[in-house]
């Protein structure tokens, strides 16, 4: 069965693969924002083997956004560890 990708699915596929997320990680965040599709259905969508109803696709986008934000929240302190705030602004340690 061949599914024609639209821009929304293409963006999800590219982001999941470029950031190295596992389908189950995306599914957990998707469920957290009230998604109802099975883990298999989400994985099929991510790998371009299936489709989801528009509402579920939008919820998957929200879950993926949350996952990306969590990833950045974990990494940002490391990127800026050499910077500290003072009364006069930012300065190197």
Image (spheres, rainbow, N blue to C red):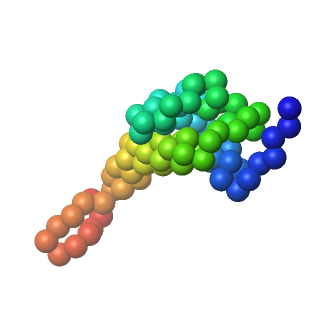
From the top left corner, tell me how far across and down residue 57 is, in percent: 58, 44
Of the pair 29 and 72, the residue shown nearer to us: 29
Q: Is residue 54 left or right of residue 79?
A: right
Of the pair 81 and 66, the residue shown nearer to us: 66
- Disc tally is 0
Of the pair 54 and 88, the residue shown nearer to us: 54
Q: Is residue 75 left or right of residue 13?
A: left
From the top left corner, tell me how far across and down residue 91 is, in percent: 27, 68
Q: Is residue 59 left or right of residue 93?
A: right
Q: Is residue 71 visible?
A: no
In the image as oriented, which residue stretches furthest toward the right?
1
Q: Is residue 40 visible?
A: yes
Q: Identify whether 43 is placed above or below 6.
A: above
Q: Identify whether 27 is placed above or below 74.
A: above
Write down the quadrant of residue 46 in the picture: top right
Residue shown at 26% from the left, 69% from the top: 90
Name the image quarter holding the C terminus: bottom left
From the top left corner, tell me how far across and down residue 26 is, in percent: 53, 35
Residue shown at 75% from the left, 38% from the top: 48
Q: Identify whether 66 is placed above or below 41.
A: below
Q: Is residue 27 left or right of residue 49?
A: left
Of the pair 70 and 52, the residue shown nearer to us: 52
Name the image quarter holding the N terminus: top right
Write down the quadrant of residue 52 in the picture: top right
In the image as oriented, which residue stretches furthest toward the bottom?
88
From the top left corner, tell me how far across and down residue 10 is, in percent: 71, 50
Residue shown at 64% from the left, 24% from the top: 40
Write down the quadrant of residue 86 in the picture: bottom left
């Amino acid at each position: 069965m061949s599914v024609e990708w639209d821009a929304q699915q293409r963006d999800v596929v590219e982001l999941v693969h470029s950031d190295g997320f596992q389908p189950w990680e995306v599914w957990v965040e998707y469920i957290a924002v009230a998604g109802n599709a099975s883990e298999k259905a989400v994985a099929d969508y991510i790998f371009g083997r299936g489709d989801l109803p528009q509402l579920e696709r939008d919820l998957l986008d929200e879950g993926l956004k949350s996952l990306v934000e969590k990833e950045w929240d974990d990494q940002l302190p490391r990127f800026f560890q050499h910077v500290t705030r003072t009364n006069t602004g930012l300065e190197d340690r």
